[in-house]
Image: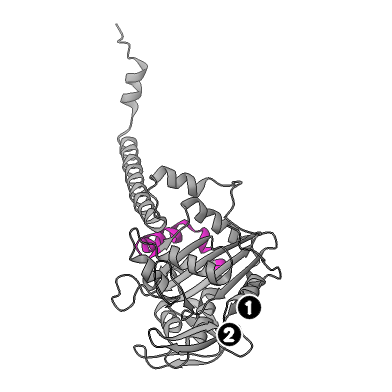
Amino acid sequence: MKKIIPNDQKSKKKMKPWKKKLLITFGIIFFIGASVFGYFAYRANKSINNITGENQSIFDTARSLLSGATNKQLKSDNGRTNIVLLGMRGENDPNGGLLADSIMILSMQQESKKIAMVSIPRDLRVTVPGTKGYSKLNAAHAIGFRQKPPQGLQYTMQVLEDVTGMPMHYGVSVDFIAFKGIIDALGGITVNAESNFYDPNYDGGIRVKKGLNELDSDKALKYVQARLTSNDFDRSRRQREVMTAIKDKAEQSGAIKNPIFMLNLLENFGTNVRTTMTVEELRIAVDTVSTLDMNNMIQKGYDTSNDGPFTSQTLPDIGYVIIPRSGNFTAFQKDIQGIFGTEITELQR
């Protein structure tokens, strides 16, 4: 009598050894891939939480970053969003690493698609919250950072609101490690220098010719730091040139939409960048910037020339400072508020 074999047993008997090996291999690859993805997702989420100060889970972060279209927009007043950008040596530098070497305001007007990058003098004489007398603007971050919890960005934003007469909606601080990391990730940048520049005082010196220059991260850092053969006003101009070069390279390479590039930046940013934005606001900011007329970005800086709103003096307690020429910030406020051709007449909060 012929023995009847169930169909499931037939299938098992027909399974070839090579098929089993193939299935096992695929299973191992899938397991390793899922583990690696989970590991990098965990590290990226940890970095994002460090940057924003939030404590979101991986799933909440993913939802914020990948949610796609949304009706939410960045904070704004009179259709204008202002973001404070600070550059500094870093909190681990004992020689004034918390003082802001670079202070800029990035203003965006979504309806007109206009964007402006404005350098603010770091030696501007200001009053910092919780202190008596005057300080330099670059000290606001250091003073606020020592509070519990640290309020470096918030202190600087508050001071800039007072002197500009405009609300500062967000703040971002970047130290020199993150600055170099961005340029390294981009593979270097091309800076269009307004004039020849040479400073022999930085580890072999820095020389940049007028026109287009290919800069790696080390040379770019020297270019934005050097001021012993020039001054802070010229340095602010060079900082804007480098920011423009970073923007151009990121646009041309499509890096900002590349997940591997963004992951590398997050790994670097975890302890070297801070922002008052939430994760969702970071995503919206990236989307918003991509809609603006970046090719016609307005760039502006302030010095102590006779036709500007500022002059300088030396004070016994804090030394060289920049002060309003008229005794108040009215002329400066009118100028910076009207940079898009529309003046804000009242600070709205």
Q: Position of residue 172 (x, y in %)?
A: 46, 64
Q: Is residue 251 left or right of residue 114?
A: left
Residue count near mark 2 (Cα–Cα under 10 Å), binned few <14, some 14–19, many ≥20: some
Magenta span dominant secondary structure: helix
Q: On the image, numbered disc 2 is attached to which residue?
A: 325
Q: Position of residue 251 (x, y in %)?
A: 56, 66
Q: Are marks 2 and 1 in contact (CB under 8 Å)?
A: yes
Q: Which type of secondary structure does the marked residue at label 2 adopt?
A: loop
Q: Nearer the viewer, residue 18 or 47?
A: 47
Residue drawn 58% across the image and 85% down it: 325
Q: Position of residue 45 (x, y in %)?
A: 38, 51
Quadrant containing the N terminus in the rendered view: top left
With respect to residue 261, does 307 lie above or below? below
Quarter of the rendering containing residue 347: bottom right
Q: Position of residue 262 (x, y in %)?
A: 45, 59
With respect to residue 118, does 290 lie above or below? above
Q: Nearer the viewer, residue 154 or 348?
A: 348
Amino acid on which disc 1 is placed: Ala
Residue count near mark 1 (Cα–Cα under 10 Å), binned few <14, some 14–19, many ≥20: some
Q: CA distance from mark 2 to mark 1?
A: 9 Å
Residue drawn 32% across the image and 11% down it: 4
Q: Earlier in the sequence, mark 2 or mark 1?
A: 2
Amino acid on which disc 2 is placed: Arg
Q: On the image, numbered disc 1 is attached to which residue?
A: 331
Is residue 101 in the magenta section?
no
- Say if residue 165 shows up in the picture: yes
Which residues are drawn in magenta? Answer: 251-273
